Amino acid sequence: MSQIAMDLSDTLAFLDREFPQMNAGGLAYRLEAVGPLSARMRFEPDERFLRPGGTVSGPAMMALADYVLYAAILANVGPVALAVTTSLTFNFLRKPGTGPLLAECRLLKLGRRLAVGEIGIASEGSSDLVCHATGTYAIPPGS
Amino acid sequence: MSQIAMDLSDTLAFLDREFPQMNAGGLAYRLEAVGPLSARMRFEPDERFLRPGGTVSGPAMMALADYVLYAAILANVGPVALAVTTSLTFNFLRKPGTGPLLAECRLLKLGRRLAVGEIGIASEGSSDLVCHATGTYAIPPGS
Amino acid sequence: MSQIAMDLSDTLAFLDREFPQMNAGGLAYRLEAVGPLSARMRFEPDERFLRPGGTVSGPAMMALADYVLYAAILANVGPVALAVTTSLTFNFLRKPGTGPLLAECRLLKLGRRLAVGEIGIASEGSSDLVCHATGTYAIPPGS
Amino acid sequence: MSQIAMDLSDTLAFLDREFPQMNAGGLAYRLEAVGPLSARMRFEPDERFLRPGGTVSGPAMMALADYVLYAAILANVGPVALAVTTSLTFNFLRKPGTGPLLAECRLLKLGRRLAVGEIGIASEGSSDLVCHATGTYAIPPGS
């Protein structure tokens, strides 16, 4: 697949309209790029997402992985608001600091019924992953 | 193992002191029971955790699974504030409604270095799981 | 669901016909019971499956988990030779000895397109799990 | 980490001595390369590993992923015969044919107590993954 179905601005517009809750309480998760079988999202944690010891909460990283995977699928198959996460697996590798995180998603499979991707999350400016995830979305028939 | 290291009130006191952020913004996650290799937590979602279509967000359920697993480990090994999640796997089975969720955790292994548990999440009053999770915590040496 | 689609003898006959390779080289994996959303399989390891130190190989246990999940799905939805495993997650909890293993599978979801189950494997006569698994099968349209 | 602890020939010698069962019945799994945080293994399936419809068995691929992860750890930390797999997660993406498979492993974390890696498996000559896996090994104290 060398073509994407929606470019960055279309994908952003769709996410803003259909998933305003992603950034309820302040813009924290921002899609930065989409491409063939890929997407990148930046997460800038505010106080809600920080934890004692100067780190980011696990659930905030899990949400980031889920969002960027959804965005990669959207950009590549077009608007499928009803695609649902069926599984997610996380390995937490290192404690991140409190700075921004970048999540890079690569789709490993984009079938008619299932999409599977992997996500690497690192602190901005670092190549060491703090979290690695894989996940599956079910795509509704007829999409 | 037929004895627990901390009873419900001790575990609650420890969580309140060490993890106030679990319920920042309003009490939503409440530990209800601990026992040998087990714990149960109730989650009462308020608007922050709801999603269009009348369901609970995935990250809210992922947080619930992580918290109840941590509580089960705490109650069974005693206060180990530094235990860290190393992996979590989720299967999302059905969409929950907007009512309270119950998470039941069972520890499958409680070793000196690693603890592994499984968690079933269901809507209160239902026996159908909406989410199933397994997870691993690393326990620091000397705990 | 209180009815199964195939009883034990029908499920065994189907497996023998469609998956003779499961026991190529000698009968090792034997389905013992099927029920609503459940199945139980016994594995009697011969030398091919043993490892130095007196234990059973990981791949032999992974195959056992995959087979019993497939058998549970078969018994509950009827003959669907084309159902395919889409994901499997294993937690290895303790080293088994060299004796027989029992795998108990419980289906957590049996949808039209996806079936999800969990599997606990223990040495015969013990209640301590040596391995826990979860897995997903995709069920072909029209089954 | 830019240095490996054992080169390819030392790693091969260790595997042959400590894990002869990996290739019992005929050489099928062959380590081809090791490097900083990486390893590559080739699997040439013979009849034992093939399935009706012209594909390779799932357990054969699961074994391949486990072996190459172990080899990557060995090469990078030195001989630790007692390192044990604690978890493995597989996503099966496409059916492979009956030809050779290549498994590329990348270590995501190499800590003193836990090593985590991801593995991509593709048919030789193809860049499409047939299976993706992540796994964790526990490294014994004092290694």
Image: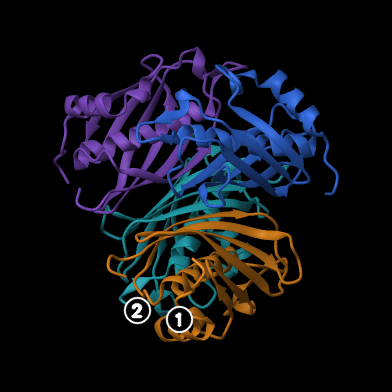
Chain colours: A blue, B purple, C cyan, D orange
- Name the one closer to the observer, A69 or C122: A69
Q: Nearer the viewer, residue C133 or D137?
A: D137
The amino acid type found where label 2 is placed reads Pro
Report which quarter residue B19 is drawn in.
top left
| Residue labelled with disc 1 | D21
Q: Label 1 lies in what chain?
A: D
Task: For residue B141, say whether it is visible.
Answer: yes
Residue A110 in the figure: left or right of residue A98: right
Instruction: Give the answer, above or below, for where A130 lies relative to D66.
Output: above
Distance from Cα at disc 2 to Cα at disc 1 = 9 Å
Asked if C140 appears above or below D13 in the picture, the reply is above
Residue A89 at x, y percent in the picture:
52, 45
Residue at horizontal 45 percent and vertical 36 percent from the top: A58
Question: Do the residues at pointers 2 and 1 share their chain?
Answer: no
Position of C34 with respect to D31 (left or right) is: left
Question: Where residue A46 appears, x then y in whole percent?
Answer: 50, 25
User: Where the C terminus of chain A falls, by quadrant?
Assistant: top right
Residue at 24% x, 41% y is: B80
Query: What is the crowding at mark 2: few (fewer than 14 residues within 10 Å), some, or many (at least 20)?
Result: few
**Looking at the image, can residue B128 be seen?**
no
Image marks 2 and 1: residues in contact by CB distance under 8 Å: yes
The chain letter for the residue carrying disc 2 is C
Indicate the amino acid at tag 1.
Answer: Gln
Secondary structure category for the residue under label 2:
loop
Q: Secondary structure at mark 1?
A: helix
x then y, percent, for residue B91: 52, 39
Q: Which mark is residue C52?
A: 2
